[in-house]
Image: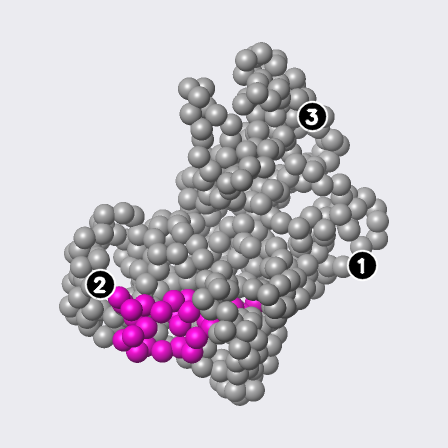
Amino acid sequence: MGWGNVMYDTLKARGWSVKSPCHAIDGERSTCMFPKEFEATLRRKDPKALFGKKGAVQEGYKLKKIPLGKRALWMQGVSSTYRIPLDKKGGRMPPVADREDFARLAAKHMKELPGKPGDFRTCGYPGVYNALAKTTFSEYFREAPWYPAAYLLPQEKDTMLKRFEKSPNEYWICKPRNDCSGVGICVMKADDRSLKWLVDHEKTSSIVQRYVADPVLLGGYKFHMRIHMVITSLSPPEAYVQAGGQCLFCTKPYSLAKDTLGARFDPPVHLSNTGLNMDEAQKDCFLKKKPVIGAGQQISMEQLEKYLAKTYGSKFNRDKMWQEIMQVSKENVQYLAQAPGIKRHGKFNRDGFFDMFGMDLMLDDKLKVWMCESNNTPGLDDQDKMYHGVKNPDYHKEHDCFAKVWNDVFTLLGLDANAKKQTKGTLKGWYQVDFSNDTK
C-alpha cells in the first residue's frame, strides 16, 4: 500500500502473492481503506464479534473475515490519498499524509499472532512520520556537525533575527514543518528584509536553516544524493545502508544571483526535488543535454564517485565520504530508537518490524557530507515512460535503480515466500551500520 508497481512486480517475481490487507475503494480524490477488517484478521475473529453488528458495517460495506495466512509481509507506505470510512457522527475522515493505522494495529496485536518469530513482518514503524518532521528532527540534531544549523519558528524568532544582524552575508532556507517536493521552500540572504519580515511574522510551525551555499557542482548544477537505508531493528538498533544510490540534480545552473533568491526565488536553481524539476514549466531544462549529467536530472552514485575521483584526484577519498554517510545513518537510527512517539508503541526488534528510509545528503566544495532530511516511505516507483509527449530520459535509470533496491532489500531481510532460487538481489550491496560502541 503506497509503494507502487516496482515493489509489486518484484514481490511477484520472487514468489509472493500480493493483495490489499483489507477492503479498499478507489475514489477520484482518495482511496478509502477499511483497517477494522485488517484488525479482525490480526485478532482472528469475525468483525461482528469484535465491533458489533452496526460497527461491522462502514459506508454500506459489511466487513468480512479475512483468514490470516501462515506467513505475511505487510507493507504500509505513507499515502496522501488514503482515508478511512466515515466516523460515528457521519463526518468524512479527510485523506492525510501521516495515517499509520495498519502499522499501529500490527504493533498492538503482534504478540497475539501465531507461528514462530518472523513469520509476520511489517514495514513501517508507527510514529516515525512525526519523528521525522523537520521541526522535531532539527531540534534534536541542533548540534550535529553534519546538520546545518536550524531555528524553529515561531518560538525562536528573536534568536534568528539576532543571527541575521550578526551575520548578514549568510544564506538561509525556509522550510515548512513536513511538506515534500519543494513545497513552501525559499532561499534568502540574511540581509534580505523580506526574510526578516517572514521570521518576525511567521505563525505556523516551520524552520529556517543555514543554506549550504557552496555545494559541489557537476557541470554547473547543484544536486543531492539519495541514499537508502533499511532499519531492521530499533531494540537493539540494527540497520543497513545500500552501497549506491541516486544523484538528483537541479535543472537550471546554480547561482546565488539576487534574481534567484527571495521574492524572485527560482526553485530549479536551488532545489533538486524530482517532482519540481519535472514540472511542465521545466520541460526544456529537463530534456536539455547538460554537461556531465546529460538529459534528465539524475546519475548514479557510481558515476558521481568516478567524476569526483577524476576531478578532485587525491582530495576525494571515497572511504571517507562513506564513513561520513554511515555516521549520519547511525545517529539517525539512534534518534529513532529513542523517539517517544515510536517507543510508546512498544519495542521493535528484527522479528516483527523493519522500515525503509531515503536520506537526502549533500557535499560542499570541501567534500564534507551534510544531511538535508530523512524520509520514510521514500519514492521507489516508476516515473512515466513518456514525459510531456517525448521519451523520459530518466525512466530506465530510475527503474533499474529501484528494482535493485527492492531485490536487495528482500535478499537482506530473507523474506522470500518459498524456496524458489532467487537470481536478483545481493547482500554485497549493503553496508552494516556499526553500533558496537553505542552508548546511547
- Could you say whether the residue bearing mark 2 is in a helix, strand or loop? helix
Question: Is residue 79 left or right of 244 when viewed as pictured?
Answer: left
- What label does residue 66 carry, if any? 3
Q: Tell me residue 242's x, y (percent).
A: 61, 62
Disc 3 vs disc 1: Cβ atoms closer than 8 Å? no
Residue 255, magenta (yes or no) = yes
Name the residue located 62 percent from the left edge and 19 percent from the top edge. Answer: 62
Magenta region, residue range? 246-273
Q: Does label 1 or label 2 sit earlier along the sequence?
A: 2
Residue 111, can we see it? no
Give me the C-alpha separation between circle 3 and circle 1: 33 Å
Callout 1 amino acid: Thr
Q: Residue 163's image quarter?
A: bottom left
Q: Which one is closest to the eye, mark 1 or mark 2?
A: 2
Callout 2 amino acid: Leu
Q: Does label 3 or label 1 sit earlier along the sequence?
A: 3
- What label does residue 195 carry, if any? 2
